Amino acid sequence: MGLMNRREFLFSGIQGRVFQRGTALQMEVMEVFSASNGSSALLVHHADEATREAFAEWLRANSSRQIVCLLPNGMRLGGRIFRVSLCFGRGLILLPGPIKAHAKEIVGIL
């Protein structure tokens, strides 16, 4: 049996965190942006300190990926997540429609 390196250990922790309704990844909303045309964006970061580094690694590997965002009210919206390169561990989720989310809420990615 081989030893697990630090990155594998931390990443396994983020993959193992299951949000209700089956998501594999949780994030905390830092700020919500809404445009007059109905589109929205969420500035997000890790859900807790234990997953901070693993979330940053995941974000670096998955920037510009299409996702399904699960909001706390159960609403699901397709969107795209981007790594904010000047802010370590921050992601920007672009969504095509309006959302009802607030700072400090936990959202999931399917």
Image (cartoon, grey):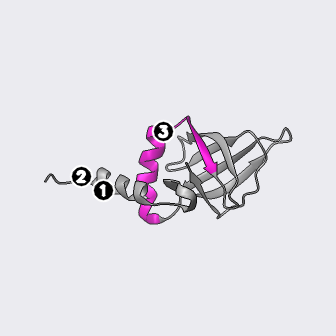
Q: Are marks 1 and 2 in contact (CB under 8 Å)?
A: yes
Question: What residue occupies the far front of the structure in this picture?
Answer: 21
Distance from Cα at disc 1 to Cα at disc 2 = 6 Å
- What residue does disc 2 label? 5
Q: Which residues are magenta?
A: 49-69
Q: Amino acid at mark 1?
A: Phe
Q: Is residue 81 left or right of residue 4?
A: right
* Prevailing secondary structure class for the magenta stretch in the rendered image: helix
Residue located at (67% from left, 41% from top): 94
* Residue 78 versus residue 3 in the image, above or below: above
Of residues 22 and 72, which is closer to you in this image?
22
Residue 9: numbered disc: 1
* Residue 50 versus residue 54 in the image, above or below: below
Kindly indicate the quadrant of the structure image that contains residue 13. Answer: bottom left
Question: What residue occupies the far left of the structure in this picture?
Answer: 1
Distance from Cα at disc 1 to Cα at disc 3 = 18 Å
Of residues 41 and 97, which is closer to you in this image?
97
Q: Amino acid at mark 2?
A: Asn
- What residue does disc 3 label? 62
* Residue 67, magenta (yes or no): yes
Q: Which sits earlier in the primary sequence, circle 1 or circle 3?
A: 1
Residue located at (65% from left, 63% from top): 105
Q: Are marks 2 and 3 in contact (CB under 8 Å)?
A: no
Q: Amino acid at mark 3?
A: Asn
Name the element at disc 3: helix
User: Percent position (x, y) of residue 51?
Assistant: 44, 60
